Image (cartoon, rainbow, N blue to C red):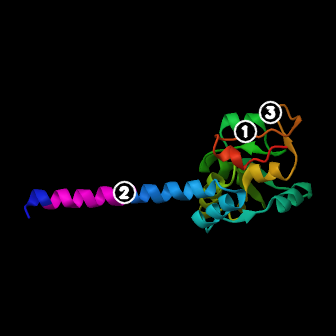
Amino acid sequence: MSRKGIITVALLFLVAFLLLQLATRGYREVEALQSMEKAMAAVRRDFPGAKPVSTAQLAAWIGEEEGVVLIDARATEEFAVSRIPGARRATTVKEASTMALGSKRVVIYDAVGLYSAELADALVAGGSEATSYLEGGIFQWANEGRPLVDADGKTTTKVHPYNKYWGRLLERK
């Protein structure tokens, strides 16, 4: 086989491998959209080092005197629709680590936990060991009927769906 033929075959194998990786990733994302349980399992699988906190545990911490630093890692438009009371928005490791500085408890959340688990994992790796992510994110929190506030601090039940696919994990009440 000529050098050109070998290079062509090698490139075809590389392209096939990349397509297989994309298909596998796509399948895993589609599988996660099937139910909240599958979405939470996907987060645990993809970020095994991140520490999850249940919605019940977070609710208990919010009610305690010691409290918790609560970080919302969603986009501006999502945060504007609703948030967990007391949450502040941060989307980068630098912003979140500044908010977490010296805190005994830090919980990061997003829609279902994917980005917040990644962010929590990065903060723990950077030395903020008291950091965890909200398992199931704000979707799980809202699905359980827990308190939410809008940008004006008024009680709401609305949650930004992120997109039409992830929004299917929100239970309509």
Q: Which residue is mark 3?
A: 151
Residue numbers of the magenta segment: 6-19
At which x and y percent is residue 94? 61, 48
Q: Quadrant of residue 75?
A: top right
Residue 168: tell me if it is visible: yes
Which residue is at the front of the view, 125 or 132? 132
Magenta run includes residue 12: yes
Disc number at residue 18?
2
130 to the left or right of 173:
left
Q: Which residue is mark 1?
A: 160
Mark nearer the N terminus (2 vs 3): 2
Which residue is at the front of the view, 103 or 14? 14
Farthest left residue in view: 2
At which x and y percent is residue 80? 74, 34
Magenta run includes residue 80: no
Above or below, comparing residue 44 to residue 71 in the picture: below
Which residue is at the front of the view, 78 or 20? 20
Give the amino acid type for the residue marked by disc 1 in the picture: His
At which x and y percent is residue 167? 69, 44
